[in-house]
Amino acid sequence: MDHSSNLPPLDTLRAFEAAARSGSFSGAAEALNLTHGAVSRQVARLEHWLGLRVFVRQARGVVLTPEGQRLLQRTQEAFSLFADTSDRWSEQRGAAVVRFSATPSVCSLWLMPRWQRLESGDPALRIVLQVDHRMVALDEEGIDLAIRCGRGGAPGRVSVQLFEEWCFPVASPALAQAIGEGGPQRLLDQPLIHDSDAAGWRAWFNAQGLDYRPRPQDRRFEDYNLVLDAAACGLGVALARPPLAQAQIDSDRIAIVDPRTALNPVSYWLDRPLGQPRPAASALATRIAAEAGLPPAKLASFLKQEARAAA
């Protein structure tokens, strides 16, 4: 029997219990590595679900209502049961832990080769990774930093452009040799591979004076990792998106079909929640900026801004 409909959202209970222990939303935010606003919204969601107040808001904190006291007792009992489970996975926490979100392709093709450099140094950092295709709500999910691919700033976060992509066609070495040199129109004789957005191919052909629209013979994959895998397996021609594809070109897994380039309409952005970033998040953002070649002035602006920005 499914009892999930009778349970309040579990993330709201976590925020509630932390606020009850600390006596304030600020204390809960610090304990959970969330913002004050995120804790407040989680408690509000819980109260809406329950249909009653669990806290009395005061000038210097919060006090449990009688209903809140009963809920706290049951919540702590339930959390104790989870804590007593010997075979459990514990999420890393602490001042040096930075929760980071990105798509699978960014994680494997850009982040992983740089992971050791990003974590090492003074101070030492620990990256906790959340791999997701979604546009996550950073503050509500406790994310300190995120890299996403898009066309500009997004609401509810501070953003800075990390790097752009000058794309060019690639394929397996055998297919690249078979296609040979010639005009850009020769690529239309092959299946073209793209991810969920074919804007890169449209931009490339447009730069060559040609029109392109996805065709039945073209192949679409939701993640860029699979786009490169398909190209390496000879399934068609893909667009190399530096720096994500550079390592596979250098290792000869894929080969350049045409050296002509075009600017991809989408680019990569480093995001953070509104408000002052934690010191560990600032340190990781600084290291990511160095890896991406971001000018120091843009990094400084990113770390200081308090509202949406598209730097």
Image: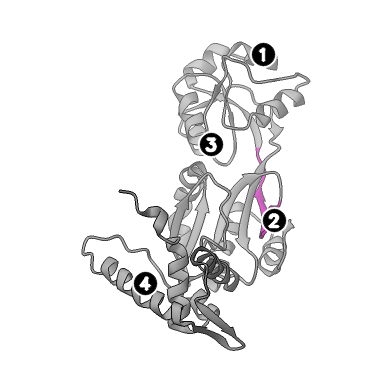
Identify the residue under disc 1: 182
Is residue 203 left or right of 247 when viewed as pictured? right
Q: Which label belongs to residue 245?
A: 3
Q: Is mark 3 on a helix, strand or loop?
A: loop
Q: Position of residue 78 (x, y in %)?
A: 31, 69
Please state which of the two labelled residues, at mark 3 or mark 1, is closer to the viewer.
3
The CA span between labels 3 and 1 is 23 Å
Disc 3 or 1, which lies upstream in sequence? 1
Q: Tell whether position 258 is magenta.
A: no
Q: Is mark 2 on a helix, strand or loop?
A: loop
The CA span between labels 2 and 1 is 44 Å
Q: Is there a contact, CB below 8 Å, between mark 1 and mark 4?
A: no
Colour scheme of the rendered structure? one colour
Disc 2 or 1, which lies upstream in sequence? 2
Q: Which label belongs to residue 75?
A: 4
Identify the residue under disc 2: 155
Tell me the kind of residue under disc 4. Thr
Residue sitting at x 53%, y 11%:
178
